[in-house]
Amino acid sequence: MSDKGASGKGASHNGSSHKAGLLSGVRVIESSLLGPGHAATFLADLGADVIKVESPAGDYIRAMTWPIVNGVSLLHLHTHRGKRSVTLNLKTDEGKQLYLDLVATADVVLEAMRPGTLARLGLGYEDLKTVNPRIVFATLSGYGSTGPYRDMPSHGIAYDTWSGIVQPVTDDEGFTRIPPTMPNVGINVGPMVAAMAILAGIVSARETGEGCSLEMAQSDAAAYMDWYRIESERAYLRPEDEVTGNPSDDYVRRPAGLAGMWEGVRYQMYESTDGHVLFMASEQAFWKNFCEGVERMDLFERWPGSTYADHARGNTELQRELQGIFKTRSSREWLDFANEHNTTIAPVNTPSNIGDDPQFQARMGFYPTEELGCEQLPLPVFVDGEALRCPTMAPTVGEHNEDVLATVLDKSPAEIAALRDAGAFG
């Protein structure tokens, strides 16, 4: 692994070997297509040895979406950084045996594709347990292995539309479209949930000597991450004498989630001289500090608000006052003001300018292009105060065939040549 740190002020990704390898000694055999392979990226970033086993044709993630960096997709460069690639033809006896041999050395097998793909090749959980009883077999797919949608092909934002996170918009010509700005939840959180479950499985296997089978879906993860809205809607199905709004709103039910923030005033975005800031003085103490700081205690005396969770909802008179106040300073000046007067104001960044934010530069920065092919965000984990070491660049198809067979399976050059001649690598 490289010792070069991330670009950005204060960000350092060159920790000592033990800090770079919390999961050193953990081996993952990954069989993946497209985004779900990100589950093992978290583990690789933390030091696990992740061996991506690909078909001879390779994972077509390398050609998917945009941007394409020197002929390779950013999606691949990020998703498969820190991993090794081996190509195996699993339709040959030699290729299948090599897969089993690799599993015998591993802690985890990640099936990040349609569930049952490996089982159909004779490499399902029951098959793999015969060579490694402690194996943790994790399946991550779009809709999971049960339910009426289990066999449907799907992509990225399907899980966010399924879960209700993303709603359609209509353009000026009357065409229905995907929103131009939106979160990408399921495709990112699904792998994160899977990584967490895998780590729990590893702990259990090492304590008990027995592996387990784990099964996760990106759609499930998208719904789970929107639990507040979904559970609020379910709660609102109950009678109003059982489930009410907040006392600061006279117990009137607000719309679920952030929709209930639309009419907020003390919790709202405001325009500064050079952008926007988020004002969040929903606690009375923060609201008082703000009014004192801008020398407008008349606003506090007229609208003191409740102790907690009072957004001054619908108070357009106060909103116009605040609108004028916030336009008198730059965003940077308002952040300095918040620190000085102990009140709640946050920056409003965009994906294009967050790299310029001093907090981002101090804590994250970017892994450099010369190390990973393009600037990439690090996994935001610090060990004993130090950031993780930069991973290696995402592999080309079959880049590590000889390396893995020699270092993991102790195959000699002659044995590797014989396997190649037999078509084990395709």
Image (cartoon, helix red, strand yellow):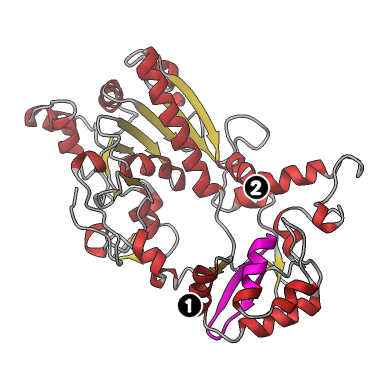
Quadrant in the picture for residue 108: top left
Across and down, in percent, residue 287 comes to 67, 67
The amino acid marked with disc number 2 is Asp
Q: Is residue 206 above or below residue 85?
A: above
Point out the tag, 2 or 1, that comes first from the N-terminus. Answer: 2
Tell me if mark 1 has few (under 14), some (14-19) or many (20+) residues whose alpha carbon lies within 10 angstroms of its own: some
Q: Please name the residue that numbered disc 2 is placed on.
A: 226
| Left or right, residue 260 beside residue 125 | right
Q: Secondary structure at mark 2?
A: loop
Q: Is residue 205 visible?
A: yes
Q: Are marks 2 and 1 in contact (CB under 8 Å)?
A: no
Q: Secondary structure at mark 1?
A: helix
Is residue 104 or residue 206 the one in the foreground?
206
The residue drawn where x is 55% and y is 70% is 341
Q: Please name the residue that numbered disc 1 is placed on.
A: 332
**Count of numbered tags:** 2
Is residue 344 or residue 133 the one in the foreground?
344
Q: Is residue 276 above or below residue 201?
A: below
Is residue 422 or residue 132 the one in the foreground?
132
The residue drawn where x is 75% and y is 60% is 310
Q: Is residue 266 above or below residue 249?
A: below
Question: Does the stretch in magenta take in 271?
Answer: yes
| Left or right, residue 269 beside residue 318 | left
The amino acid marked with disc number 1 is Arg
Across and down, in percent, residue 291 comes to 66, 74
* Numbered range of the magenta stretch: 268-290
| Left or right, residue 305 beside residue 83 | right
